[in-house]
Image (cartoon, rainbow, N blue to C red):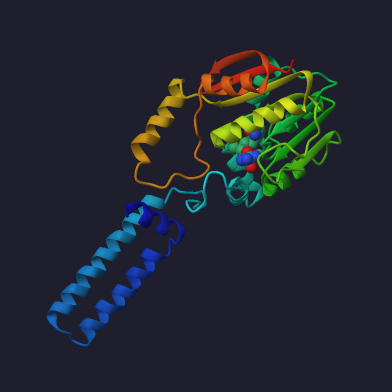
Amino acid sequence: MRRRIASLIRRNPWVPFVACACLMVVFAVSVWIRANGGIIVFAGIAFAAACSFWGYCYRAFKFANTPSLDHLHRRQYAATWDALASSPQEARAAACGATDERHVRLSAQRAVNNITELAGIQPGDHVLEIGCGVARIGLELASRCLQWTGVDISQNMLACAADRLSQLSNVNLVHLTATNLDSLPDSSFDLVYSTNMFDHLDQMDRCRYVQDAFRVLRPSGRFYVDNTDLESDAGWAAFANGVATLQSFERAPFQPMLATEAELTAYVRRAGFVNIHAHHRSPVVILIAIKP
Ligand SMILES: C[S@@+](CC[C@H](N)C(=O)[O-])C[C@H]1O[C@@H](n2cnc3c(N)ncnc32)[C@H](O)[C@@H]1O
């Protein structure tokens, strides 16, 4: 019941205000027409209760700056991420929490360093990012490789990415209409990576992207994937906080889902990769693997 009410109010934030206004009118009219004392008291109590409910809702949702997406399921990826990226500014915020270009570029450095150090980027590489968002990472990596391709399920994200990459000629953006890489040919990339993206996927979709990464990589191609690490202290703290505070609320479809080294290794190994190495760099766990 509480969850239904919370979800209703998130989707229709005007409801408490309208309820309050209606009950105020009822109370005022009952006083004006000198209605029966019981009716006046009842209308007064209902009006006061509606006011305090309105105040509660205002405080509860004051800090929610993301749209209410409780009505969407996790696997409605396109609807979720298009809603989160309804303007270029919101797209940047949804990708990395920063809205101004300088901070977006700064925020990319950690992942760029990890990818460069652990997977390596060669000048002749064809590189693919799965779930590229606003090309936060692509903008930094494109100048270091031959061709950079970014794929994403959200057209709004890709529109922002196209704008950010407009000065580069060796980039390619592909809109995915489903959670797979069916639109990309076999054995066509030297490096496939996905960062800050698997957190948002259902487990089976994570596994599908690993299998598809294997297919589109050339022999000796490298695969890089990261996810917030349930086994790190920071990852556990975020997860435990959710356990403590999100019991009676709908969980948003973009709520990060943590993973472990064991889970990611299972997908990567079963897909056929070899030379699998895990790196724990709190709060993420990174897997690097090679296609034989
Ligand atoms: C938090 S953003 C990160 C974007 C980018 N990797 C970065 O680090 O800046 C997650 C991205 O994954 C994309 N995404 C979510 N679900 C997806 C799916 N099923 N297939 C492909 N992309 C997806 C979203 O549209 C969004 O652009």
Name which quarter of the figure residue 213 lies in: top right
Q: Which residue shows up at 54% across the image and 37% down it?
A: 202
Q: Which residue shows up at 21% across the image and 82% down it?
A: 31
In the rendered view of the protein, which quadrant contains the N terminus? bottom left
User: Horizontally, is 220 left or right of 69 in the view?
Assistant: right
Above or below: residue 12 compared with residue 120: below
Q: How many marks?
A: 0
Above or below: residue 264 compared with residue 7: above
Q: Position of residue 57 (x, y in %)?
A: 36, 56
- Depth check: give the residue in front, 33 or 78: 78
Residue that sits furthest to the bottom in the current view = 33
Q: Which residue shows up at 80% across the image and 30% down it?
A: 186
State whether residue 178 appears in this view. Answer: yes
Q: Position of residue 25 (x, y in %)?
A: 30, 78
Q: Position of residue 139 (x, y in %)?
A: 74, 33
Which quarter holds ligand 1? top right
